[in-house]
């Protein structure tokens, strides 16, 4: 495995710390993000291909343009978490799914609570769009970056 590195970028929602290796973005965390790892253990190089591309991708997203954030095959996690996170990539910008829809998309319609737990551990906020998942009643439910950020992100996408 190649060494992981980090970069802090400015966003309209506050600083976002990106974590990557030489092949893909592995994490994106706000300063007050729940389950945020100790980010100081990774170097912050001035130039890094994946981080440069990710920063451009997030910049495009926040400016309202199409973005290309290099998430690769999705960040490390359990096989179930990775399956859930891959399903989140299918949710188009401007749309929301319920936790039950995500569970159905992975062929496990009775695993709604497990799906919700996996979504809550998504290390790639915004890039793997967990903010597009809402409660069955349309309520804005938990978001590791904070419910106000989730509300902002959905409004930014026209929801």
Image: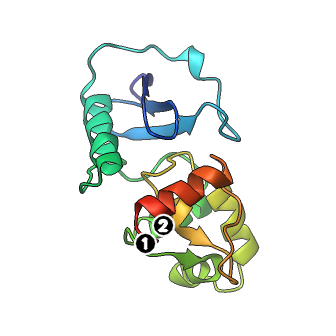
Locate residue 142: give its quadrant.
bottom right
The residue carrying mark 1 is: 91
The residue closer to the viewer here, 103 or 69, is 69
Position of the N terminus, as image quadrant, is top left
Q: Height in image: 97 above or below 80?
A: below
Residue at the (67%, 55%) spot, across then down: 147
The residue carrying mark 2 is: 88
Locate residue 84: give its quadrant.
bottom right
**Image x and y of residue 76, in percent:** 52, 45
Mark 2 and mark 1 in contact? Answer it, CB < 8 Å.
yes
- How crowded pointer 2 is (Cα within 10 Å; few <14, some 14-19, many 20+) is rated as many
Residue lying farthest to the right in this orientation: 113
Residue at the (71%, 85%) spot, across then down: 110
The residue closer to the viewer here, 140 or 5, is 140
**Image x and y of residue 68, in percent:** 26, 50
Locate residue 36: give its quadrant.
top right
Task: From the viewer's perspective, tell me whether residue 120 is left or right of residue 7.
Answer: right
Could you say whether the residue bearing mark 2 is in a helix, strand or loop?
A: helix
- How crowded pointer 1 is (Cα within 10 Å; few <14, some 14-19, many 20+) is rated as some
Residue 156 seen from this side:
yes
Q: Height in image: 83 above or below 120?
A: below
């Amino acid at each position: 495995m190649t060494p992981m590195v980090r970069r802090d970028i400015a966003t309209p929602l506050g600083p976002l710390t990106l974590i990557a290796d030489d092949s893909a973005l592995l994490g994106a965390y706000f300063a007050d993000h729940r389950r945020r790892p100790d980010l100081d253990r990774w170097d912050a190089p001035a130039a890094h291909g994946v981080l440069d591309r990710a920063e451009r991708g997030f910049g495009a997203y926040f400016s309202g343009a199409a973005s290309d954030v290099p998430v690769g095959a999705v960040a490390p996690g359990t096989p179930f978490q990775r399956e859930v996170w891959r399903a989140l990539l299918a949710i188009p910008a401007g749309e929301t799914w319920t936790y039950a829809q995500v569970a159905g998309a992975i062929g496990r319609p009775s695993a709604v609570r497990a799906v919700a737990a996996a979504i809550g551990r998504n290390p790639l906020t915004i890039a793997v769009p967990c903010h597009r998942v809402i409660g069955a009643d349309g309520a804005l439910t938990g978001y590791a970056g904070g419910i106000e950020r989730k509300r902002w992100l959905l409004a930014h996408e026209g929801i």
